[in-house]
Amino acid sequence: MQLTSARSRWTWIAGASIPVLTATVLLGPTMRPSTATSHWDAPATTLNKQIDATDLYAFTSPERQDTVTIVANYIPFQAPHKPYQFDTDARYEVHIDNTGTGKAAITYRWTFANKGLPVPSFVRKREHKAGPLDSLVEQSYTLTRLRDGESEILVRNGYAAPTDMGALVTPNYPALRRKAVVDLPGGGKVFTGTAADPFYSDNHAVNLLRFGLPFFPVKTGVPMNVSSLALQLPKSELALGGDPARNPVIGVWTTASRKSSGLLGSGSADYKQVSRLGNPNFNEVIIPLKQRDHFNTLRPDGDESGNLVVPATLDPDQAKVVAQQAGVTAPPAPRKDLEQIYLTGLTTRADGPIRQDLNSHLLNQDTPRVAKAEELRLNMSTPLAAAPDKYGILKGDAQGYPNGRRLIDDVVTVNLRMLLGEPAGRGAPGLIAEDNPAFLLKPITGSFPYLALPVTATG
């Protein structure tokens, strides 16, 4: 995996200018947010970004190749000069399907608690009004692993790295980052806290994919931050039967669930799933707008029998919209190629049009059947690419998306080109120029959690 990233050519002007720049660069012709991958993927998450999963990554750890790194990012579009918090009434979870059934064999669950700290008066004055900076809140978390009907607390009172507020408020921030990396029983690691958003694309690709609308190609980004949940786990912990050589394929997705308000049950303390993310762009591109909040409540093990996920994948309306705008013809329904990419994984052992043994659970020796379930699938046995390519499978890089997802993968462009028929057919490979920049001002790091340090008000 390539652990360096092109530095953005965008120059930071001032923290106060972020809203103007965001409106200018991120809003398309319809004045709706044109967002990075799954940022704001449904109406409810747009209104409540604490539970909005922005991106999910899963890849073999480059310096510890017997482990997999999984990163789930939440809370999009964080302005660098403001603190943000995970929801203390929510459960944030990463799920692992190693059986191909769409059911979580292993779940890693974060829950959060607040620890208030006073904020210096000069920081409060910058706001000119009551707001988030009236109290800088650090958070602690509990990380629990659920498997085989049992739960085990892996971390108690874990430290979540806060927003980098500058040297006067959060001195020696790199030390806070190191403090937030915690060893787990069995040889894993966890990181929880703020990081620079590693979104990778330009707005021409984003607007075509999301809205089917033209938009001038912005070649620089508006760097912002996200709240990250990152795990580095032994492959033997994730694989079916503990044997990654025999059963190398896993499916991954992340969810956020919130405590019931009690409206449907007096005083209920049950949790309701309100956010779901596996493959990038799936909800906002494949699922019809009116059904996106509903999709966020579903589990993958119900996708095959339900009447939403499979039909929408086989005949996505957005493919026709994008094709018309691009001046090409969309592949006809049923889109068995998209079914492979999103719902079953790729293998020659099934009858899909993409003839490649890549990341289907059928490649596991102990998986007799694969359910159609929307998950980000990773073949843990795929060797690290000697020359990683951000376009993954479209450029012959088997380690890249959709075989998991690395921090460098340009998934917006890849998904756009897949929507138009690649790699099953020719598609429209020249639609987007292959020079999209990263939004990062700071480089991805060379060790776990790999995420760049948060962007600050000065860059």
Image (cartoon, grey):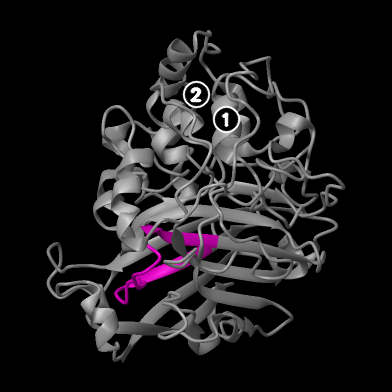
Is residue 79 covered in magenta? yes
Residue extent of the magenta highlight: 72-94
- Residue for badge 2: 314
Relative placement, left or right, of 259 versus 407 is: left
Q: Is residue 415 visible?
A: yes
Q: Residue at x 55, y 39 (%)?
A: 201
Disc 1 and disc 2 in contact, CB within 8 angstroms? yes
* Viewer-nearest residue: 62 or 232: 62
Q: Residue at x 49, y 79 (%)?
A: 161
> 276 above or below 137?
above
Three-letter residue code for mark 2: Leu
Give the class, few, some or many, for how many residues have Cα within 10 Å of label 2's Cα (few <14, many ≥20).
some
Label at residue 339: 1
> 214 above or below 218?
above
Asked which secondary structure carries label 2, the reply is: helix
Give the class, few, some or many, for how many residues have Cα within 10 Å of label 1's Cα (few <14, many ≥20).
many
Please provide percent x and percent y for residue 136.
32, 83
Relative placement, left or right, of 178 versus 395 is: left
